[in-house]
Image (cartoon, rainbow, N blue to C red):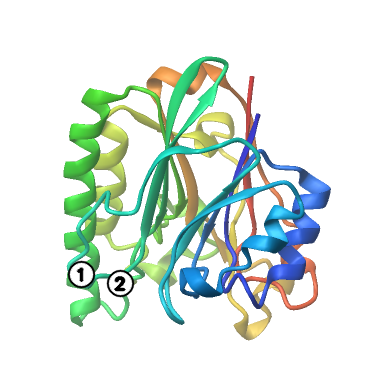
Amino acid sequence: MKVCSWNVNSVRARINNIKNYIKLSAPDVLMLQEIKTEEKNFPFNEFKELGYNSYVFGQKSYNGVAIIAKKKIIDVDTGFLKDEKSQSRIIVGNLINKSKKILIINIYAPNGNPVETDKYTYKINWYKNFIQKIKKQILINKNIIIGGDFNIIPENIDVYNHMKYENDALFKIEIRKKYRELINLGFVDVFRYFYKDKQDYTFWDYMSGAWQKNNGMRIDHFLASNNILGNIKSININKKPRSREKPSDHTPIELEFN
C-alpha cells in the first residue's frame, strides 16, 4: 500500500499536475493540503474518473485539506480539532490495511510568520491543542499516521541554511520543541528513521531561483506511531512534480507499507 502526502498550493490550479502524478505514481491514498477551495468547487469528478473517492474539508481561497483514496476511508472527521480561527486544517479517517485499522491524520499546520504577530501565537496554540488531542487519541488507537505540511523544520540538516531561519516561525526552538513533543508521544519521523544523515527537502520557494539552487527545506512529514513502524517498507521524496510547469512549491512524500 502506498500513502502519499502533498501540499498542492491550490487543487484547481494544479489539477493537471496532480492527475499526472496519480497516473505515474498510483498512490492508494493521497493526502492533499492547501487545496484553497470550498467543497462545492472541489474537482470530485476528475478524481473519480481515475478511480478515487474524495473526502474534503475545504475553505474559500485559503487552507483546506482532502484525502483521496482508492479504498473507502471510514469514520471521516473534519471536526477532529477545534480551530480558534475556524480554519480548515485537519481531516482524519480510518483506513483498513490487511485487517489493521490505521488512523490517517492529514494536517496543514499554520505557518506562523511573522513571529511578532498573532499568527505566531495562533501557531503555538494550534500545536498545543493538537498535541493534547493526539495524546488522547493514541490511547484509543495505537495505529496512527500523521502526515502533511507541518510548517516545521525539525533540525539544522532539514534546511539549506539554518542560520537564516533561527528567528523564523518554521525553525524557532519553541516550534521545534512542539515537533519533539509530538514524537515523544510515541511516534517516529519516518524520513529521519530511514535516512539518519540525508539532507533532502520537500519545499522550495518560488522566489530567488530556490528550486534551481536547491535552497529548500523539509517541512512536510510523515509521523508513524511505534506500533506500525514495522509495517513501513520505505519513504521517498518525489521531486519530479516540483520540476513540472506551473508546479506547487512543495513536492510529494511517499510511504510504502508491507
Categorize mark 2 by other alpha carbons within 10 Å: few (<14), some (14-19), many (20+): many
Q: Amino acid at mark 2?
A: Gly
Measuring from the top left, give residue 8's x and y in whole percent. Answer: 59, 66
Q: Label 1 neighbourhood size at 10 Å, few (<14), some (14-19), many (20+)?
A: some
Whether residue 181 is situated above or below residue 16 in the rendered picture: above
Q: Is residue 15 visible?
A: yes
Work out whether residue 240 can be spotted. Answer: no
Of the numbered discs in the image, which one, if any, rests on residue 112? 2
Rendered residue at 33%/22% (across/down): 142
Foreground of the two, 49 or 237: 49
Of the numbered discs 2 and 1, the one sitting upstream in the chain is 2
- State the SS at label 1: helix
Tell me where residue 37 appears, x and y as whole percent.
Answer: 50, 75
Residue lying at 62% horizontally and 51% vertically, measured from the top left: 200
Task: Examine the image and state in which quarter residue 202 appears.
Answer: bottom right
Q: Are marks 2 and 1 in contact (CB under 8 Å)?
A: yes
Reading the image, the residue beneath label 1 is 122
Q: Nearer the viewer, mark 2 or mark 1?
A: 1
Q: Is residue 217 left or right of residue 173?
A: right
On screen, residue 7 versus residue 252, left or right, reads left
Name the amino acid type tagged 1.
Tyr
- Compared across the picture, whether 214 is left or right of 39 comes to right
**Mark 2 element type:** loop
Whether residue 209 is situated above or below residue 80 in the rendered picture: below
Residue shown at 46% from the left, 82% from the top: 61
Out of 169 and 162, give the one closest to the viewer. 169
Where residue 78 sits, quadrant-wise, is: bottom left
